[in-house]
Amino acid sequence: MKAVLILSGGLDSTTLLYKLLADGYLVDALTFNYGQKHKKEIDCAIAITSRLDVPHQIIDLSTLAAFLGESALLGKKEVPSCHYTEEAARQTVVPNRNMIMLSVAAGYAEAHEITELFYAAHKNDQTIYPDCRPEFVEALKPAIRLGTAWNPVELQAPFVHMTKADIVRMGLKLQVPYELTWSCYKGKAMPCRTCPTCIEREEAFALCGCRDPLIGMDSH
Amino acid sequence: MKAVLILSGGLDSTTLLYKLLADGYLVDALTFNYGQKHKKEIDCAIAITSRLDVPHQIIDLSTLAAFLGESALLGKKEVPSCHYTEEAARQTVVPNRNMIMLSVAAGYAEAHEITELFYAAHKNDQTIYPDCRPEFVEALKPAIRLGTAWNPVELQAPFVHMTKADIVRMGLKLQVPYELTWSCYKGKAMPCRTCPTCIEREEAFALCGCRDPLIGMDSH
């Protein structure tokens, strides 16, 4: 079985990569440069796919940043330092980002006659990011299937009803090397531990009764 | 009323631009460079929007051509010289192309708080291009609406049940300067009159009892 996976280099999509490999899929991983401020996640995606010897394409859509408004992930606006409150997190929305990446990935899958397309949308992101919600996934499925009708592609989002803690729990069993993944929006040498995604990540590990290895490295 | 329009510089989307302006819309036109072999359509889109003083963005997605397979519109494969038979025309399919452009345009619309997004899919293209079919449009509408939930965008494809001849008939009434538009896949100085889209365009004008001004220019 072949599958295309959108791999950011973060915790969620890396866990999904390990899950798909454990399930016997041959995975083509796609990583998007959509003009995000730092490239640490992309470097992580490269390190992970190299370690696993998984085919990996980096698709440069960085020209889009100029057309998608003022997200704190793209432009001059500062990344907020607080928990995922609605107001803070909304500043990190890149309009329709996941649909853009999924459309390209579906085209790639169709061109390469790969029938399954995976992405790691999960429950925690759904308050803020509309393109992580189950109703979006359900609506996009038939659109992708119909748009790729010469070689129909099926969208799969197996984590859509799981929390980040559920994902970490699965990943620990799969021995995902979380020290190779990156989540922090700020892209400094170590996670800032104050931006929304850092706080969420740390909480997910705490809920699993353990510590993020990236933070462990920080304290030693 | 504001609208975003995907404008290729071809006959269909140019007619839609004139229709929207006649209906009182303020239009932001987006033209995509998706790595197509020639840039004549893009030059036409620039000429048309300059004449009309319509805001116009050219979005460079040319990096995608390397990931979307072997379409005759992108790569080394030759553009077929015959009518739109299934076999010939299938070579001109760029996998999921319209969905990719619509996803980006929806992100642009959401970022700019524009609630309507138009594209000029029409009936003639539906045998060959899945992402021009009414069922694709109907499936994509809720996906776009849900994916852009912070500023919901509504997809509109008003030509989806019209033939190319219907579009030309409308455009002639709107005095669309068809000599500024370009359809031919080959991108030489004048239309080749043998590729599928040239044949279709010439037939559409013939069905309206007149001649394509581009062809008229050729014969004088």
Image (cartoon, coloured by chain):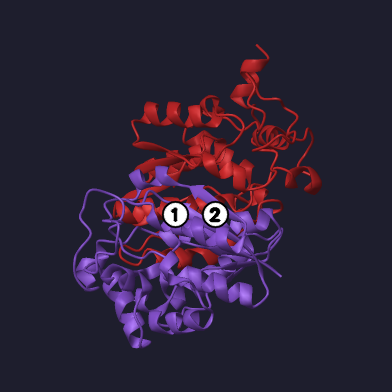
Chain colours: A purple, B red
Q: Residue at x 41, y 51 (%)?
A: A34
Question: Is disc 2 in contact with disc 1, using a CB cutoff of under 8 Å?
Answer: no
Residue B102 appears anywhere in the view: yes
Percent coordinates x, y for residue A36 in the rendering: 35, 52
Residue farthest to the front, as pictured? A220
Which quadrant: the N terminus of chain A?
bottom right
Percent coordinates x, y for residue A103 in the rendering: 53, 57
Q: CA distance from mark 2 to mark 1?
A: 21 Å
Residues flagged by tags 2 and 1 on a common chain: yes
Mark 1 surroundings within 10 Å by alpha-carbon count, few (fewer than 14), some (14 through 19), many (20 or more): some
Residue closest to the eye, B41 or B27: B41
Q: Amino acid at mark 1?
A: Asp
Q: In front of the other: label 2 or label 1?
A: 1
Q: Give above or below for B182 relative to A116.
A: above
Q: Answer left or right for A24 relative to B142.
A: right
Q: Residue at x 75, y 33 (%)?
A: B78
Q: Amino acid at mark 2?
A: Val
Which label was assigned to residue A43? 1
Mark 2 surroundings within 10 Å by alpha-carbon count, few (fewer than 14), some (14 through 19), many (20 or more): many
Percent coordinates x, y for residue B161 in the rendering: 59, 55
Q: Answer left or right for B42 relative to B149.
A: right
Which label was assigned to residue A17? none
Q: Answer left or right for A162 relative to B62.
A: left
Residue A156 appears anywhere in the view: no
Element type where label 1 sits in the image: helix
Element type where label 2 sits in the image: helix
Which quadrant: the C terminus of chain A?
bottom left
Q: Residue at x 30, y 77 (%)?
A: A202
Q: Which residue is mark 2?
A: A104
Q: Which chain hosts label 2?
A: A
Percent coordinates x, y for residue B38 in the rendering: 59, 29
